Amino acid sequence: MTDPQLRAEILRLARGWLDTPYRHQASVKGVGTDCLGLIRGIWRELYGAEPEAPPAYTPDWAERSGQETLRDAAERWLTPVATPHPGDALLFRMAPTAPCKHIGILSAPDALLHAYWGKAVVESHLVPYWQRRHVASFAFPPLPQE
């Protein structure tokens, strides 16, 4: 599968999660997910088993720990990219000096698929609120050759 084909497949899979209710620490399509759960679910659909189990986390985990847990995991399993394309994962900081705490899939140059806290998986405009908080972009790795 070529890089553009993989990104198209990621978008197809991500859109399959639309309207999945927001549930903290969940990752079950149609039942419940948070932002990390969406990425985990797409990973499972593409590659099978997840490469590592996420630690338990509270809604304020980033503020309390001050550690880049989400970014560190993204750097272990995804490929950093300077210019994101639809199908890439975007990381966000909710405050300038806070650790990364939100992740979604770029679905168009101006749109984001993500688990919206307290709502559901949505596709929304990449408005200035999100643009200002975007700090890193990652591509999913190539699929293993069959």
Image (cartoon, grey):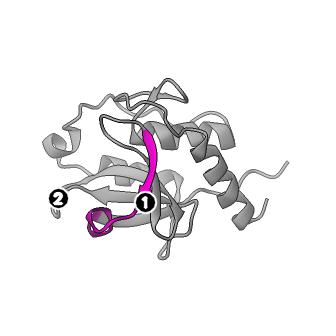
Tell me what residue is drawn at x 62 percent, y 57 percent: 141
Which residue reaches farthest top?
31
Q: In this view, does 129 lie above or below 22?
A: below
> In what element is the residue under mark 1?
strand
Q: Which of 72 and 8 is in front in this view?
A: 8
- Determine which quarter of the picture holds residue 64: top left
**Alpha-carbon span between mark 1 and mark 2:** 16 Å
Nearest to the observer: residue 143 or residue 87: 87
Task: Identify the magenta region.
Answer: 121-133
Q: What residue type is labelled 1?
A: Leu
Q: Which residue is drawn at 22% across and 55% down?
A: 94
Q: Which residue is drawn at 54% across and 27% down?
A: 30
* Residue visible at 45% across and 40% down in the picture: 121
Q: Position of residue 73 (x, y in %)?
A: 42, 49
Q: What residue type is labelled 2?
A: Ala
Left/right of residue 64 with respect to residue 29 in the rendered view: left
Give the secondary structure at mark 2: loop
Residue 102 lies, in percent from the top left, at 33, 50
Residue that numbered label 2 is attached to = 95
Answer few, some or many: residues within 10 Å of disc 1's Cα (few below 14, many 20 plus, some between 14 and 19): many
Which image quadrant for residue 55?
A: top left
Image quadrant in which the N terminus is located: bottom right
Q: Does the magenta stretch include residue 130?
A: yes
Q: Name the residue under label 1.
A: 90
